[in-house]
Each structure stands twice: as structure tokens, then as C-alpha cells.
Amino acid sequence: MNNYNGSVLYNEETLRRMGKIQIRSRVIHNVIYLAMCIVLIIAGILFGLKTMPGLLCAAAGGIGIPLLGSVIRARTDNIIKALGNNTVHVSYTFDSTGVSASTGDQSNRILYKDLCMLWEDAEYFYLFYGKVDTLMVSKKSLVPADEAGFRKDIAAITGLTWYQYTSPLMINIRPLIQELKRTLQNRAR
């Protein structure tokens, strides 16, 4: 694997962008959550909207839909509030065993074996470790400036597939299948 360096400047814009990717990357969770909301609305209609059980089911389903991703949005809002008007520049060094992230006075090491998902959009790479912990790397900051090589090397060393975020209206079935496989593998352990 080639060694790469990259960075990101965390501010309100980049943190909100990362939060949106974190929400959209939880494909199975989102599908199940929305299905439960729809089932509650249908149950409410079947019970009858003039009955207490019907009204409660329909209300719970209707209220639940806009709450999708609210935990991550609240977490993002708290980070932005704590950051204030400041910015944080994080530098990344990718070597053969993992990623070193440093802000100048602090550093952290994430091993490739701890990564669980790889996403990208037009401007950033997102490397997930844990449920929502994410490394965000600006594609413009990559040294050497070889996005295809970086993508290939990280996928090879982690055994993970890169997912391209395009639009919330486009359903990307590959992350859904990959996440389902990971979930089943984790439960089998």
C-alpha cells in the first residue's frame, strides 16, 4: 500500500455534510425504521382513525417519520455548538496498518481492521469506524493526488467496498446488501 496524507477542516458546513452521510449510510436501520412507521400508519387506518388505538398508531407513525436521523442530527448540532465559530484542522496519515489523525496537539490511531464502512461523495472520503464515528478526508488534500489509487488501496487492505453517495432519491442497493451481510456475520460471532 502507498502511504497517503490527507486532511479536513471541520467547521459547521463539513460537520453537517458528514452528519447527512452518517444518516444515509445506516441503510438497514433507515429502511426498518420507515417500514415500522408505515406499518403504524396503516394499522391506525385499519383500526379506524376515530378510535383511540387507531389514532395512537397513526400518530406514532406520522410523528416517527420526520424523526429519522434525529439522534445523529442532535449529535452533530452538539458538536457544532461546542465548536462555536472555531474550526479544527485534522491531518491524516495512512500507512500499511492504519490511519493516524492529528490536530496538532492531539493524535489518535485507527487501525484498518476497525473500519466498517467506506463512503464517498464528490468532495470527500468517509471512513467509518464504530456506529457513527467517521474520518472525513478532503479529496483535494490527498497526497499523492491519486483518488483511484487511494480508493483501491483502502478497499484492498480493509476488504470493504466503497459506496458512492449520489442523491437521497437514488436508492443504492449495494450498501443495503453489504450492511445486511455484516449484520448477519456479526450476529454469528
Image (cartoon, rainbow, N blue to C red):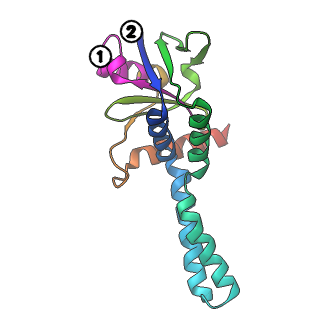
Residues in magenta? 132-155
23 or 81: nearer the viewer: 81
Residue wearing tag 2: 2
Q: 59 above or below 14?
A: below
Q: Distance between the residues labelled 1 and 2?
A: 10 Å
Residue 24 screen position, x and y as percent: 47, 47
Amino acid type of the residue tagged 2 in the rendering: Asn
Q: Are marks 1 and 2 in contact (CB under 8 Å)?
A: yes
How packed mark 1 is, by other alpha carbons closer than 10 Å (few <14, some 14-19, many 20 or more), is: few
Amino acid type of the residue tagged 1 in the rendering: Asp
Question: Which residue: 46% across, 48% down?
Answer: 176
Q: 176 above or below 101?
A: below
Question: Which residue: 66% across, 43% down?
Answer: 187
Residue wearing tag 1: 146
Q: How many labels does the image show?
A: 2
Residue 155 screen position, x and y as percent: 42, 25
